[in-house]
Amino acid sequence: FSILNIFFNKKYLKKLSHFSLMSLSGIISLSLSLLFIRTLIIKNLGIDSAGFWDSLWRISILYFSFLTSSFKFYILPTFSTLKKNIQIKKEVFKIWKITLPTIILITAGIFIFKDFIIRILFTPEFLMIKSIILFQLLGDVIRIHSWTLGNLLIAKSKTIIFITLQIIWGLVFSGLSL
């Protein structure tokens, strides 16, 4: 146990617990929102419609994960080193100058080739998601920009603000889906 005391530091544990709380709040908020929306769709439209909605969500996750994992290794270290607000603002807008055109190109491509993409990924029955894909794509354009700001909050260890925004986001996402 004395060896553990050497490596165990309450100060560091407290600092690291903030990051765990932020991560958990995101996971819980998203999971509860998705569960609520899926349950709502099943109750009002049936299980098939929930499957269609879930397939659209999966398409979104594919390219969104690619974008976020590409930038993650740059954003967090960069944001954590910036101290002045003007530096932070410049960096946010610099990132948005890259992500905005990128997400617009990706979502426009998905929208234009939606029939082709849906037929490759799913069966022809899933073509009905064409009627709602635009809403998902517009939401993704907003989501990539809020993701950048969320990473800023993580880098600056703004735990309470981050958790509050995660809860608000979950409620807004669920409300808009309603």
Image (cartoon, helix red, strand yellow):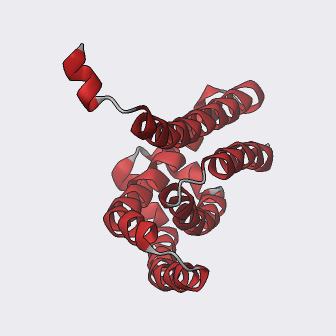
Q: Position of residue 72 (x, y in %)?
A: 37, 62
Quarter that holds the C terminus: top right
The residue sitting at 54% across, 61% down in the picture is 147
* Residue nearer the viewer, 83 or 43: 83
**Quadrant of the rendered structure where residue 146 is?**
bottom right
Q: Position of residue 42 (x, y in %)?
A: 68, 27
Above or below for 145 versus 98: above
In the visual, does 14 lie left or right of 168?
Answer: left
Above or below for 18 versus 28: below
Quarter that holds the N terminus: top left
Q: Give the residue furthest to the left.
A: 3
**Quadrant of the rendered structure where residue 174 is?**
top right
* Residue nearer the viewer, 107 or 140: 140
The residue sitting at 64% across, 31% down in the picture is 32
The residue sitting at 52% across, 84% down in the picture is 87
The residue sitting at 39% across, 54% down in the picture is 62
Above or below for 55 versus 7: below
Q: Position of residue 116 (x, y in %)?
A: 40, 63
* Residue nearer the viewer, 36 or 123: 36
* Residue nearer the viewer, 137 or 123: 137
